[in-house]
Amino acid sequence: MEVTAAAGACCRGRDDHHAGEEERSSAKDAKVVVPVGSDGAEVEPCVIAVDDSSVDRALVTALLRRSKYRVTAVDSGKRALEILGSEPNVSMIITDYWMPEMTGYDLLKKVKESSKLKQIPVVIMSSENVPTRITSSEFGFRCLEEGAEDFLLKPVRPSDISRITTRMLLH
């Protein structure tokens, strides 16, 4: 099992915990929840990236970090759940659909069934290369029905990251 950051380390503030969150209104009257550290300074949002492919995991991690997100990258849904169990400051989960032991769909279900985690947006990625199969297929429909925020086709592009993070982190 590979983890590219210490468990929970990236999802914490500069002093390893958040003092709270600050709400601001944007120009469109959407509220932006901005995590703040105990010193009152803004803390970048944290994303858990889950993929059994080290190449895809590294790509997603690099794209998110370029967009100023802190990332904990793990190779399994089971490891993601372990981190989620001890880390309260996760802003989003981005996960591959097809993984051994626990699929992205299984991870999504566990997150949405948990009263502590269900508010965290989950985005599913797939290497399925026929977009209509993703949106109309059993697994695509099941994930959206279960509460997935979106689907991304691999390889993930910078525009995908920009689109989902803008939509997920503005509520």
Image (spheres, rainbow, N blue to C red):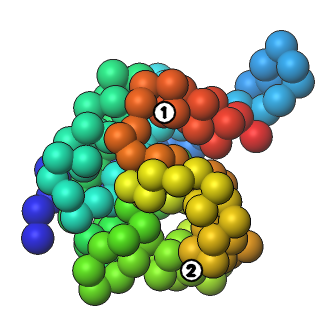
**Residue located 59% across and 61% down the image:** 134
Q: CA distance from mark 2 to mark 1?
A: 22 Å
Q: Element type at marker 2?
A: helix
Image position, residue 50 (x, y; %): 33, 59
Q: Is residue 155 above or below residue 127?
A: above
Mark 1 Cα-neighbour bin, 10 Å: few <14, some 14–19, many ≥20: some
Closer-to-camera residue (91/38): 91
**One can see residue 28 in this view:** yes
- Please count the marks in the image: 2
CB under 8 Å between discs 2 and 1: no
- The residue under label 1 is 161
Image quadrant in which the N terminus is located: bottom left
Q: Element type at marker 1?
A: helix
Give the left or right position of residue 137, taking residue 27 as reference.
Answer: left
**Residue located 56% across and 43% down the image:** 20
Image position, residue 161 (x, y; %): 48, 33
The amino acid on which the numbered mark 1 sits, given as a three-letter code, is: Ile
Residue 13: image quadrant is: top left
**Residue located 11% across and 62% down the image:** 2
Closer-to-camera residue (11/103): 103
Of the image marks 2 and 1, the number of the one nearer the N terminus:
2
- The residue under label 2 is 109
The amino acid on which the numbered mark 2 sits, given as a three-letter code, is: Lys
Image position, residue 52 (x, y; %): 22, 64
Image quadrant in which the C terminus is located: top right
